[in-house]
Image (cartoon, rainbow, N blue to C red):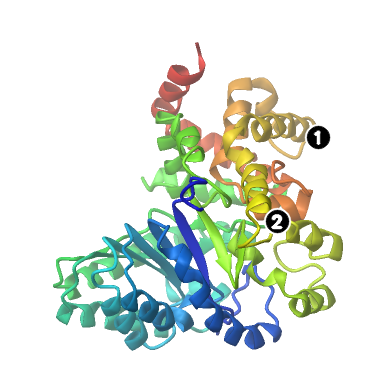
Amino acid sequence: MLRELGIRGIRVDVSSVCNMNCEYCFIPKSKVMRKLQIDVFNSLDKAEKWLKEASSLTLWGAEPAFGLIRVADILQSGDYYFNEIYFATNMTVSPKIYLQALKKFNGKTRKVRLQVSLDGYKEMHERTRGKTWDRIVNNTKELVRAMNDVDISYELNIKFNTVVDANSIAWLAEDLARVDKWYQFFDEFVGELESISTNPNVKIGKPLSPNIAVPGKYTKQDGINFAKVVRRYIDNGYTFGQFYRFVQLLKRPTDAIDKANKGNASCGAVFGSIGYDRGTFHPCHRTYWLQDDEYVEDVIKNYEDWWTSRADRATIENVRRHIVSEDDEYRLKRMLYTLGATQIYPQLSFNYSYAMVKMLAKAGLISKIYLEKDWLARLLALYTAMGIRCVMENWIVTGSVHITPASYFKLLGNGAFELLVEHHKKEVLGAWRKAYSK
């Protein structure tokens, strides 16, 4: 059924618990999640029939490491093969767990992407993720060293998920030398890992820049702070990773449509895949636990307004309408069409974003330059509609998957976006003229 609907990948919930509570985490924690762990483990068998239809497998959870071995055992015992297996981890558990799972993935995939959550050097990381830096760094080294003695048939890519939220951006803006220190740390750390590794199938990736926390609550002042940080990127010859990907999209503007028509069922972060948890299909990994009534009641009681967004009953119920049973093919098709429209018909999101850019500029919440340079306003609208969006956050804040929260415009439209466009002027304008000036 999934292949017939154009869905190529599946993102499976493998663990409902996490041993950390990062400042900007978009999943409100609850004691109920520990009770759900057994249900999640027991229901993974239900996912087996869908795994054979998928060409890519993503392992999600509060912390996927706690379910890695369970999934690896399932894959090892069945006739499965994927183009890619992906999972992100905080790398705080024993490296033996990752090592055991990676061995069992042998013969089951062409590539494994392992993403480690590490926000930078120690002082920076522990501002948002707690006192975990030493453990993460040492565990990563130990895993890379252990892989030297493992013969794997696939390519293992180890990368880093490094995030900045509003507080981190303000902290960086206070002392821009901290931006330089971030780059220096990853240069040295990735270099050290590469010197440790002797396995030709293990590749270590260096992040281009910290990722902006999406979803997030951003103000005009956050945008001013972010512009200072972006200026430092440019002055020192660094690359802002998320915008670099957007430039590549502009060079190949049809990619967005092509990807949309090849099974972009849900979240904009992962093309061509759908979430799965305990017998239900999901539009986003943030919705996995919202199907549980006890969890929802606890969230409503204790997290009326957590860091990223509100969680009132009406908002959650609106989201829950898009969680469908794996046996309900009609509702699944309806969900795919409703959510896929954000990609299949991008003009819906773009037109709203363009109007929002103009309105915020008139209100003085973003730069007046977006009133003066219409092409720049359109480019910012395209970026917010296609390059930095979070479908789930659209729902929770605005009530519609098509409407981007105003906070992202405030973050980008107060100097940062203009600087990035100017820095990539030749690439951006060349692609823009080619694609849109006819």
Residue at image coords 81%, 77%: 297
- For mark 1, does the 10 Å Cα neighbourhood hold few (<14), some (14 to 19), or many (20 or more) residues? few
Give the structural element (helix, strand or loop) at label 1: loop
Residue 322 badge:
2
Give the structural element (helix, strand or loop) at label 2: loop
Q: Camera-side residue: 104 or 18?
A: 104
Tell me the residue that label 1 is attached to.
363
Residue at image coords 18%, 67%: 153
Q: Amino acid at mark 1?
A: Ala
- Pointers 2 and 1 in contact (CB under 8 A)? no
Mark 2–mark 1 Cα distance, whole angstroms, equals 35 Å
Picture quadrant where residue 255 is located: top left
Q: Is residue 412 left or right of residue 122?
A: right
Q: Amino acid at mark 2?
A: His
Q: Is residue 365 left or right of residue 27?
A: right
Residue at image coords 84%, 65%: 312
Q: Is residue 168 visible?
A: yes
Q: Residue 306 location in percent, x, y?
A: 74, 69
Q: Is residue 133 visible?
A: no
Q: Residue 6 location in percent, x, y?
A: 48, 45
Picture quadrant where residue 118 is located: bottom left
Q: Is residue 82 left or right of residue 271?
A: left
Q: Camera-side residue: 268 or 158?
A: 268
